[in-house]
Amino acid sequence: MFGAENGLLGSAKLPSMDDEARQISLDRSRAIELISVSRETLSRLDRFVELLLLRNQTTNLIASSTVPHVWTRHVADSLQLASLAQGRVWADLGSGAGFPGLALACAFAERENCVVHLIESRDRKAAFLLDAARTTGAPAVVHRGRIEEVARRLGPVDVVTARALAPLPKLLEYVEPLVTKGAKALLMKGQDVETELTQAAKYWKIGAEIVPSKTNPSGRILVVSELTRSGLGKPQRSRDVR
């Protein structure tokens, strides 16, 4: 009754692996046009993406719907941060599948004495990050633990990043220990970031600017250079801190 012979299941053709590979290749070309990188960096990113797509078959690293656009949606989106801050020591909070932290580390491998600290609490994702750092040779150090605990143990950090991690009032709690010591925070947010800023202003005095994303029309990057508590109370802490 529901066999492919009557067209009920066979009418919608799923994309073949060749179709998906072609889409990924085209997306890679678009990403290179958006964010220019050296041949050596591109080679490291190729190895990173290859491992990511292989592991994504067994570990939920990125949404399957974003696989055909992995280069623009994830890689190029991450690499745009490199032009927004200078520094040799970076820290990425809740690194997950390696965006933006490991992608940036691939780009920073040619910089002298540069390192990216990747903070991730989930075992399987932390294990993936370790393998990806080894495979690419990127200057990344993986820290398996909660953000609140690891961030306070880090030495001086020049830049701290986060992508799709938490609502802004909570996110500022996580970056505060680093920003108050001189780090600049690059926080990747959506088009509602101004609403989030209004909410966060109940608890924080924030020195920041909003930069439009180069890869996502609705994306915004909040560049935080100053951060102090307003004394009006504390925002509710997240129960799920990566």
Image (cartoon, rainbow, N blue to C red):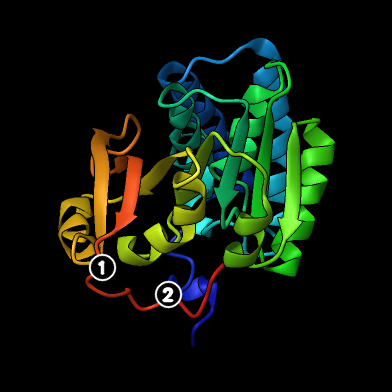
Residue, disc 2: 8
> Which residue is at the far top?
38
Residue 110 x/y as whole percent:
70, 16
Q: Residue at x 44, y 55 (%)?
A: 176
Determine the secondary structure under disc 2.
Answer: loop
Q: Is residue 241 left or right of residue 164?
A: right
Task: Give how far apart the Cα atoms at labels 2 and 1 are.
Answer: 62 Å
Residue 231: which numbered mark, if any?
1
> Which residue is at the far front?
231
Given residues 131 and 173, the one toward you in this image is: 173
Determine the secondary structure under disc 1.
Answer: loop
Label 2 sits on what residue type? Leu
Residue 118 x/y as whole percent:
66, 48
Q: Residue at x 43, y 17 (%)?
A: 33
Please identify, in this view, whether the residue under mark 2 or under mark 1 is nearer the observer. Answer: 1
Q: Is residue 200 left or right of residue 147?
A: left
Contact? badges 2 and 1 (CB < 8 Å): no
Residue 109: which numbered mark, if any?
none
Sequence-first disc among 2 and 1: 2
Given residues 108 and 67, the one toward you in this image is: 108
Q: Residues within 10 Å of mark 2 (few under 14, many from 20)?
A: few
Residue 172 x/y as whole percent:
38, 58
Q: Residues within 10 Å of mark 1 (few under 14, many from 20)?
A: few
Q: Quadrant of residue 222?
A: top left
Label 1 sits on what residue type? Gly
Q: Is residue 103 visible?
A: yes
Q: Is residue 45 visible?
A: no
Q: Residue at x 61, y 57 (%)?
A: 152
Q: Residue at x 44, y 76 (%)?
A: 238
